[in-house]
Amino acid sequence: MENKRPLILISNDDGYQAKGINSLVDMLRPLADLVVCAPDGPRSGYSCAFSAEIPLKLVLRHEEPGLQVWSSNGTPVDCVKLALARILDRRPAMVIGGINHGDNGSVNSHYSGTMGVVMEGCMKYIPSVAFSLCSHHPDADFEPLRPYVEKYTRYVLQHGLPEGVCLNVNFPLVATFKGVRVCRMARGSWVNEITTCHHPRGYDYHWMVGHYRNDEPEAEDTDNWALTHGYIAITPTTFDVTAHEFIESLCDII
């Protein structure tokens, strides 16, 4: 890899062949040397999971000046760990997750393997950003995201991020973005998550389905409101889940 340019590590939870990650590579080629290390197939919902009981394989899928593409049979977090430990010859300037096929706003960010990628980078104190488009279509059009992905990547390459903070950037599926909002996570939840079916051989089996419910739809400072109203939503996110505001009260109780 050429050392004169910054190095970006890219991963996702849709697999190395997904259109989203390949669109991201095309957008970022002019900005940096790129190493992609992504799952060999879909790993949506894996969050920050890593593999402790199965052996992991790495396969070099493609290589050219300024770009390597690797796949692994592991989780998105496995891919980041493997790349940092076994592939990269220098510390990356950034870790980027995406572009995800689907919304990673609100509580979805806790389940997302794409967010797992950037959380892992963040826990390694590497500036990290996740990009997601609110479309699950495998052939979604990512081109409208290009100027924003380039802009935010350039900014983080030049200025970094506060230690322990990563960015969760979600794009609505609209013809024209109304603008950009920096916002908090909406409070929401998944409901009616389990569908049970009876198998002809005499046993029940269960599907994870359900739908997301925004529990504060009128709150205009949230990512859900921004996305619903056509705005790009940027949520600064931290891996520190301490309820700092409750520490003093809890000390008084105990």
Image (cartoon, grey):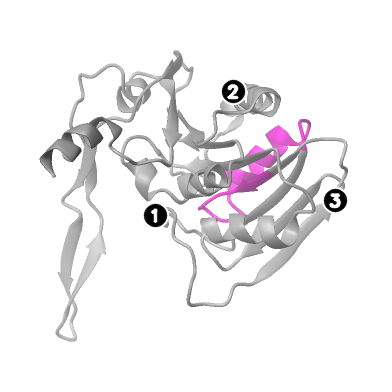
In the image, residue 22 lies in the stretch drawn in magenta: yes
Relative image position of residue 178 (x, y in whole percent): 44, 13
From the image, tell me which residue sits under label 1. Answer: 45
Counting from the top left corner in percent of width and height, residue 67 is at 79, 47
The crowding category of the residue bearing disc 1, from other C-alpha atoms within 10 Å (few below 14, some 14 to 19, many at least 20), is some
Above or below, 227 relative to 12: above
- Residue at 11 percent across and 40 percent down: it is 253
> Distance of mark 2 from mark 3, alpha carbons?
26 Å
Image location (x, y in percent) of residue 52: 48, 72
First of labels 1, 3 by sequence position:
1
Q: Rounded to the nearest whole Å, what is the CA distance between mark 2 and mark 1?
A: 26 Å
Residue at 13%, 45% in the rendered image: 254
Q: Between disc 2 and disc 1, whose residue precedes?
A: 1
- Does the image show residue 173? no
Q: Position of residue 193 (x, y in %)?
A: 20, 54
Give the magenta range. Answer: 9-32
Q: Say which amino acid is labelled 1.
A: Gly
Residue situated in front as seen by the camera: 120 or 98 = 120
Labelled pair 2, 3 in contact (Cβ < 8 Å):
no
Q: Residue at x 60, y 58 (%)?
A: 81
